[in-house]
């Protein structure tokens, strides 16, 4: 981390760079050559830019979407990266959020299931069980406290999700676990999902589940963070972000 880069931004940049470089992704830019979607403040205490959404594409992924919102007047420094595999794939999507609000840090790390874990044991064993040691180490880091997520939010993510508030030192330590989750996800992308784990689930079933799952995850009724984003960037920009995040590849 440089002197001018916050801990959340440093983690975000490290993860994003690793994904973009690993798969040689290209960035989709706006007509003016800037980020895919500039985010302009609608707040009276802050004028001008508060961040941007960026979009990267290239095989074997569908798209990588980032969202960065920095509002010094609110002491907010928030960065998200969401790497989407194709909708007809059973390989999980990868996501990590990193946030500083005042003196407090927070993060969210997960691989998003593409099949029902409650009925697909072979898929769960192959795709998620290898994360258990990392999840346990991450959960045991001193200085973490549970993030306030509703049962609905928990229900649409994975049981291996780590979502916590963190002291500064705990936030630094979680970087090692992020690296381990990312390395496992890279392996899944490279190797694919076995026929045994797929258990006869068709491409059309995967696409439809992906559509429904994204509608639930990126939903202002389910995730109250969107109720805070709208006043900062306006309803049009917030809706554009949701629309982009909900997109399916087939």
Image (cartoon, rainbow, N blue to C red):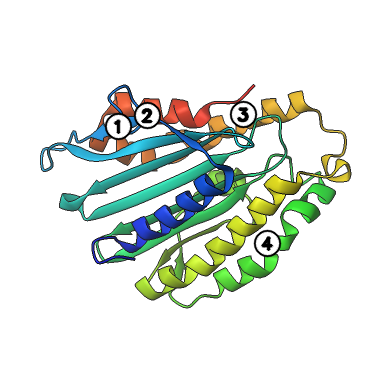
Most foreground residue, 132 or 53: 53
**Cβ–Cβ below 8 Å for labels 1 and 2?**
yes
Q: Residues within 10 Å of mark 4 (few under 14, many from 20)?
A: some
Q: Quadrant of residue 234?
A: top left
What SS does tag 3 mark? helix
Q: Nearer the viewer, mark 4 or mark 3?
A: 4
Residue 151: x and y in percent read: 55, 48
- Residue 224 seen from this side: no
Local packing at callout 3 (Cα closer than 10 Å; few below 14, some 14-19, many 20+) is few
Q: Position of residue 98 (x, y in %)?
A: 40, 55
Give the distance between the C-alpha atoms of the residues marked 1 and 2, in whole angstroms. Answer: 6 Å
Left or right of residue 130, residue 40 in this image: left
Sequence-first disc among 4 and 2: 2
Question: Does residue 179 sit above or below 211 in this rendering?
Answer: below
* Residue assigned mark 2: 29
Q: Which residue is mark 4?
A: 131
* Residue found 60% across the figure and 63% down from its top: 180
Neighbours of disc 1 within 10 Å: few (<14), some (14-19), many (20+):
few
Task: Say the numbered circle drawn on residue 34.
Answer: 1
Q: Earlier in the sequence, mark 1 or mark 4?
A: 1
Residue at image point 37% right, 71% down: 167
Label 2 – label 3 distance at C-alpha:
28 Å
Q: Position of residue 162 (x, y in %)?
A: 54, 60
Residue labelled with disc 3 = 212
Q: Secondary structure at mark 1?
A: loop
Q: Earlier in the sequence, mark 4 or mark 3?
A: 4
């Amino acid at each position: 981390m440089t002197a001018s880069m916050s801990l959340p931004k440093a983690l975000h940049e490290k993860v994003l760079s690793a994904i973009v470089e690993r798969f040689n992704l290209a960035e989709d830019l706006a007509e003016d050559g800037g980020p895919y979607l500039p985010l302009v403040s609608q707040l009276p205490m802050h004028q001008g830019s508060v961040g941007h959404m960026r979009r990267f594409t290239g095989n074997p992924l569908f798209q990588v979407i980032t969202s960065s919102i920095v509002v010094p007047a609110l002491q907010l420094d928030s960065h998200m990266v969401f790497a989407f595999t194709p909708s007809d794939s059973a390989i999980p999507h990868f996501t990590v959020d990193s946030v500083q609000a005042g003196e407090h840090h927070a993060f969210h790390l997960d691989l998003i299931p593409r099949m029902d874990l409650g009925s697909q044991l072979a898929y769960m064993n192959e795709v998620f069980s290898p994360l258990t040691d990392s999840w346990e180490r991450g959960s045991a880091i001193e200085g973490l406290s549970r993030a306030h997520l509703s049962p609905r939010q928990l229900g649409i993510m994975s049981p291996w999700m780590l979502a916590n508030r963190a002291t500064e030192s705990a936030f630094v330590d979680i970087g090692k676990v992020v690296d381990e989750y990312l390395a496992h996800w890279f392996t899944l992308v490279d190797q694919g999902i076995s026929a045994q784990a797929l258990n006869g689930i068709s491409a059309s079933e995967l696409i439809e589940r992906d559509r429904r799952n994204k509608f639930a995850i990126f939903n202002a009724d389910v995730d109250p963070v969107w109720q805070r984003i709208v006043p900062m960037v306006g309803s049009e920009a917030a809706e554009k972000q949701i629309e982009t995040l909900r997109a399916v590849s087939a």
